[in-house]
Amino acid sequence: MTRLPPLPYESWIPTRIALHLRLQILGKIRMALRPGRNHWWHVPLYVSARGMTTGAMPGPGGRLLEIEFDVLDDVVALRTSDGKRQTVSVRDGQTIQAFYRDMVGALKRLQISNPIAAPRPFDAPSTLPFDEDTEHDAYDGDAVRRFWTAMTQIQPVFQQFQGRWVGKDTPVHLFWHSLDLAYTRFSGREAPALPEADPVTQEAYSHEVISFGFWAGDDTTPEAGFYSYTYPEPDGLSDERVRPNGAAWRTGDSGTLAFLSYDAVRTAEDPEAALTAFLTSTYEAGAQRADWPDGLVRTGSAHGAGTKT
């Protein structure tokens, strides 16, 4: 972690919201085209070398389609496995309505019908249908690049932490519904049923989890930061010590989570060690209090890390 840029929350609120909505459009295309996977793993986006990507998705005619939000060139690139390519520019003053229509047009030129069944945001800062949203039109490319640069530095630390896990876990992926880079471990046991919850929540929390993530903040937490929570939340979780200095438990309507501000990591003498300490200590706290099975964490270095082949 050599270059964590500043991410002052107040400075890019309009751009963050509009970026969130644009990524929801990409994510809904991915959700429609990819085969379903447990816990909605077919839905998230991924951090790429140029921005955020859907990865390859099955398209009509046996072709693959990939859509990448290229933050270096401020375009969305749509590419198919038969060599065709379309781009949609992203710019300040471009409404979500205009962006959505441009995306539908680019798909059409690739002979792909718009697959989005519900063209409106999900659990986002706006409820306006994409085709009617003339309110959100901000785009500060420098701010978006800072957010992406932060994720390019954070993702490898998450992946190194992931490499020590031998049980079931998720990829490190970008959930577009909440705009957070997330990673989750599973104990292997089912969680109590949630009959009153919506279908999304029921599927996401059908099994015991300890989750970790990075997100840009929201109205209730107006700063970028790292989080971890254990579900179902065990008794005494917040009594456990978490590291590094500055990390703390927070309790809200949805339960208790550990929080560490992005700036605390960014300004640490060793940012990678600080973030790794947070991930490790919050996992240990949840696993101990929830009595997770032993043997799910590989001791020593992650398999393959630093080895010669």
Image (tube, helix red, strand yellow):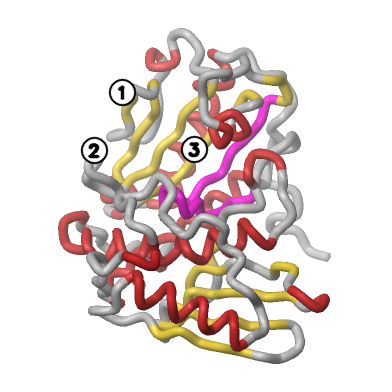
Q: In the rendered view, would you say 248 is above or below 18?
A: above
**Residue holding disc 1:** 252
Determine whether, in the image, residue 201 is placed left or right of residue 15.
right
**Residue holding disc 2:** 220
**Is mark 3 in CB contact (under 8 Å) with mark 2?**
no
Kind of residue indicated by mark 1? Gly
Q: Locate residue 242, reporting x and y percent.
A: 40, 27
Kind of residue indicated by mark 2? Thr
Helix, strand or loop status at disc 2: loop
**Residue holding disc 3:** 279
Kind of residue indicated by mark 3? Leu
Q: Locate residue 30, reporting x and y percent.
A: 61, 62
Q: Locate residue 216, reporting x and y percent.
A: 33, 52
Instruction: Choose top left, top right, bottom left or bottom right for residue 23.
Output: bottom left
Q: Main secondary structure of the magenta part?
A: strand
Frontmost of labels 3 and 1 is 1
Residue at 20%, 58% in the rendered image: 8
* Label 1 or label 2, whichever comes before in sequence order: 2
Using a 10 Å C-alpha cutoff, classify the residue at mark 3 as few (fewer than 14 neighbours), some (14 to 19) or many (20 or more).
Answer: many
**Is mark 1 in CB contact (under 8 Å) with mark 2?**
yes
Q: Is residue 177 magenta?
A: yes
Q: Is residue 268 visible?
A: no
Helix, strand or loop status at disc 3: helix
Q: Residue furthest left?
A: 10
Q: In the rendered view, would you say 191 is above or below 221?
A: above
Using a 10 Å C-alpha cutoff, classify the residue at mark 2 as few (fewer than 14 neighbours), some (14 to 19) or many (20 or more).
Answer: few
Distance between the alpha carbons at the discs numbered 3 and 1: 21 Å
Q: Is residue 230 visible?
A: yes
State the extent of the magenta-drawn residues as a range: 171-187
Residue at 68%, 25% in the rendered image: 187
Helix, strand or loop status at disc 1: strand
Determine whether, in the image, residue 126 is placed left or right of residue 230.
left
